[in-house]
Image (spheres, rainbow, N blue to C red):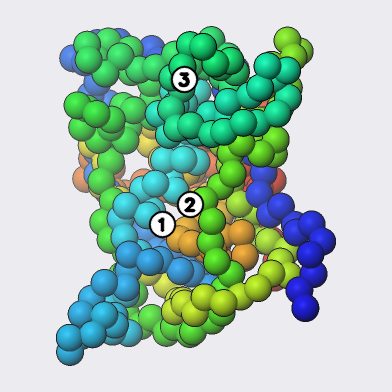
Amino acid sequence: MYNTAEQPKNYDFVPFPASVKNTYITDMKKRRGNNSGYAEIEITTVDNLYIGSGFSHYEAGKGILSETQKIIPASSLKGSVRQIARAVSDGCIPQDKMEIPVFDRKGDTVKEVRRGITVNKAEKKPPLLTAKQRKKCDVKDKTEICIICDMFGTMSLGSKVRFTDLKAEKCPTETVKMPQQFSPNTASDDYWYIGDDNKPYYKGYKFYYTYCEPREVQRNETVSVIRKNVTFKGRVYFNDLFDDQLELLLYSLGVGKNISLKLGGYKADGFGTVKTSCTELIVNDKKRNAYELANKYAKDNADILEEIEDILCYRER
């Protein structure tokens, strides 16, 4: 018999910036910063890690990935790093992926949820973002681009940063029982708050704690996971980054001592915490100290990092 009491939340939100700054780049001719090179990184699993797309190698006609060929896909790492970088800067907020609750006439009951910010005019559309937060980058004319879109790219705008897949020489796994996974219920009032104008607004960027309290739930799914203390190696290439962009990139990779990344699935159940180290940073053919640059960003922006560092700080097991 499983406990039906309320389960630990295991996540929190980093508030969106009060206003979006889309003027980091206003002239595409001035998009070229003075930092190009690569960071050699190692990512070590602190907890078990489940990366579904890493189990795609076919061995002897079976969908089994051999012990020496498991990877952390570049897309998984890039997505996590980009989300952290968004949360610690004043870049644009990705509104196209938001699920919008449609409220009743009283504005206090959720009727349904729709993806995107456009709903029928006959229905009541809650703000969820303020006018200053809704401002989008000008992708068409490329005259108003935020720091995040300039770094990581967006539609019709190439990225300045490229991630490689991360590979481990030896990658022991184990089979465990896990609970069924569900999509986030963004219509829940856990995701929004009532402002002074009595209208609902999204709380911000969602992150899972690096240490999660155990949940007493049914565990019927059998999954193969990568064990703790496995080290993956790869590179992050960058071109034409400005100084603050390079510092932001290294901070968001978790290179400094302030935060740990969460990767893969089952984050709410304690999976996915990793530690990042940079074994070599080459900028314009010269060695640089990655930790100093990451910690410089942390020091210069300490006032806006308190929330994310509380969620993603490393916690002793």
Q: Is residue 267 above or below residue 232?
A: above
- The spot of residue 21 in percent (x, y) is 46, 15
- Residue type indicated by callout 3: Val
Q: Identify the residue at image location x=53%, y=61%.
A: 181
Q: Is residue 143 above or below residue 90?
A: above
Residue 28's image quarter?
A: top left
Q: Is residue 305 visible?
A: no
Where disc 2 sits, the SS reads loop
Looking at the image, residue 142 sits to the left or right of residue 186; the answer is left
- Residue type indicated by callout 1: Cys
From the viewer's side, name the closer residue of 245 and 282: 245
In the drawing, what numbered circle is on residue 119? 3
Q: Which residue is mark 2?
A: 255
- Callout 1: few (<14), some (14-19), or many (20+) C-alpha neighbours within 10 Å? many
Where disc 3 sits, the SS reads loop
Q: Which residue is mark 1?
A: 278
Q: Identify the residue at image location x=43%, y=64%.
A: 43
Q: How many marks?
A: 3
Quadrant containing the N terminus is bottom right
Residue 171's image quarter?
A: bottom left
